[in-house]
Image: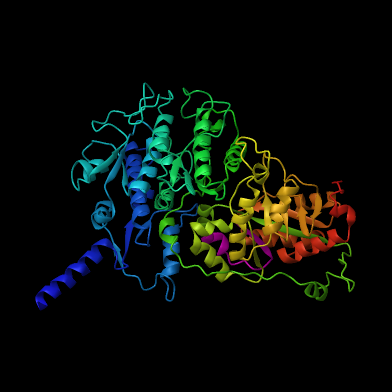
Amino acid sequence: MKNFLYLVIFLCAYSLHVAGADHTIYLLDFRYLNKYDLHDPAKVRSIWDLLHAAATLQGVVNRESPRLYIRYVENERGQNVDDYWWKKYRQPGEWLADRDTVVLSGLPEALRIFRREIDGVVVYDPAVASTSNVASSVAGVENLVAVRYDSSPSSLYTQIVAEGLQLPVRCWLVNPDGSSMFTGKGTIPDIGKASTGSVKIDPYVWFMEKYLKAGRCNTEYAAYYIDQYWRKAPLRTVSNHHQLTNHDFFVSKKAFFFDLSPWADEPATDDPGQRVGLDCEMLKSMLLEAYQQNGGKKFCYIGGFPSWAFKYTKHAQGRHDDVPTEWEFSRIISAYNAFKDADAIGLGALANASFWQHFPLKKRYPQRWVTHEELKERGYLNEDGTVRLDGREFVIFYVGDYDASAWTAQTTPYLWDHPDRGKVPMMWAISPVLAERVPMVMHNYRMTASENDYFVAADNGAGYLLPGMLQQPRAVSGLPSGLEAWSRHCRTYYRRWGLSVTGFVIDGEAPGLSEEGLECYRRFSPNGIVPQKVPLTLLYKDMPVLRSDYDITSPHPDEAARVMMDRISRRPVPFHWFRAILKSPSWYKEVSDELHRQNPKIEWLDAPTFFELYRLYLQQNEAAAKGEIQMK
């Protein structure tokens, strides 16, 4: 009997180890892929196959707990971002300090370790680019690993499907002999619907019928990442912009993936033979299905951004420029109650979000607002409570763009960790919804912030959408107002992260905020908003509204200060908002010093002081409060 008990204990311990249920973390090192020559098609295929399979595996095995971690993503400075965050939270007393780790020899070993966690593979077609995104969708729903069909002896398919591990194929997106299942002709396999005439779109129609409409996906999450088309032109931007490492989080959420053009006035540039606007129609169909399943009460969180260097813009022989493409995509998704976490080109790669999603955040991260007594003590208010100007000009910077999990995680080592941070007030505009994929970054910022670091929401609240498209009448979708749902969604995030200011509201090609839109923002952002399509100044009830002014792009502080001085001279109010993207704390310090040198009456303020003084100024100036002041 005793021997039998020992055997049971041993087998239980072994099964726990094999499945990773003993809280062991397994590490896969893909850093060597960064040295591959992207001029070599074989190396490009290898990068694609390994990272796609690894990301889908991660999404499945990390769904309930953090178990598989990869080392891969490098930022523009050559720093390994995955190592940076791993080392930070492996320090004594941190989240991962006491976790056992096992370094794996490669992907096949990882698949052996987690064999019981996956149900097999989904095999997709190298000749039909869109099947790779459909494969990621199916992988999340069915607990599968995505593998590209390739019968060559050294391929991953041969190693783990045809031979080697011989994982079972649970879903074919290509015929088993390697011929294409989707041809753009006749009827679409399995569903009996007539082909759209597009090889690209037919797989999405197949997926819509078999999975999305059947309610098998989690329609609160979607992923907008480039498909296999990347393999044709991997050198158009940074080497990791295949963004396969971004898939894991969305696979873990059972999200739906897509790569579709937002333009209705031309064929998609990667499918020029399709009917004009077919991509856009497919996009709207998927978003409408998500809206309906979410009951109009929840928002769909979309990770990703138009891959403008590859598709859908003039860079790919399209008709449209980059920013209009960004705004058109934003306009469409907003009409269906969806927003994006904008992993844009350049800094768009993010790994291990399925792992970090389990990071233990605090319940609240409060921030203090300034009191009127403090403003009096600092000389900003007279004894009667009026704003003491004395010829002063008040300046604040929107420190951006941190509306993307990937951008924020990648830039932390050289922007947030810069030794000059804290020398001048900085209004860090960080979307609170980033806590979904990079909670460890958000926590780190709050735990290491100086007295001069204050946080507001990035565009346009808890996620990037165009709020004018939430207002009725809603162009594109014709759906009921989404303002109440947006207010409810944002309030949850703002409350947790101590936010009361929305540092920038991009209106793009959408309508500006109506009174209903302003009321929506007042409910969660009572201390201020900075939209594009409003009067220069406005007090809505008690919420200060300031029109966004100017982006400062020059890397040279003296030139930046010159441009700002010109703008200040033309604004008839003493409150000035400027925006800069990915500038270092040293740049802000030098710009501040140069402004003060040119005009000692210019004061660089922290966010609570700036917006509270601005509110009081509006209360004391009727014309400004009513929006009647014009630029000089």
Across and down, in percent, residue 30 comes to: 34, 53
Across and down, in percent, residue 459 comes to: 63, 51
- For the image, the number of numbered tags is 0
Answer with left or right where residue 442 lies relative to residue 20. Answer: right
Q: Tell me if residue 315 comes above or below residue 385 in the rendering.
A: above
Across and down, in percent, residue 33 comes to: 35, 49
Answer with left or right where residue 408 lies relative to residue 204. Answer: right
Quadrant of the rendered image containing residue 189:
top left
The answer to whether residue 448 shows anywhere in this view is: yes
Any magenta on residue 413? Answer: yes
Answer with left or right where residue 442 lies relative to residue 627. Answer: left
Any magenta on residue 565? Answer: no
Across and down, in percent, residue 556 comes to: 67, 52
Q: Tell me if residue 488 comes above or below residue 376 in the rendering.
A: above
Q: Which residue is drawn at 81% across and 52% down?
A: 537
| Coloration mode | rainbow
Q: Which of 554 and 472 is in front in this view?
A: 472
Q: Tell me if residue 535 comes above or below residue 612 in the rendering.
A: above
Q: Which of 400 and 266 is in front in this view?
A: 266
Q: Residue at x 26, y 47 (%)?
A: 120
Q: What stretch is highlighted in magenta?
A: 412-430
Q: Tell me if residue 541 comes above or below residue 43 in the rendering.
A: below
The answer to whether residue 307 shows anywhere in this view is: no
Q: Quadrant of the N terminus?
A: bottom left
Quadrant of the rendered image containing residue 128:
top left
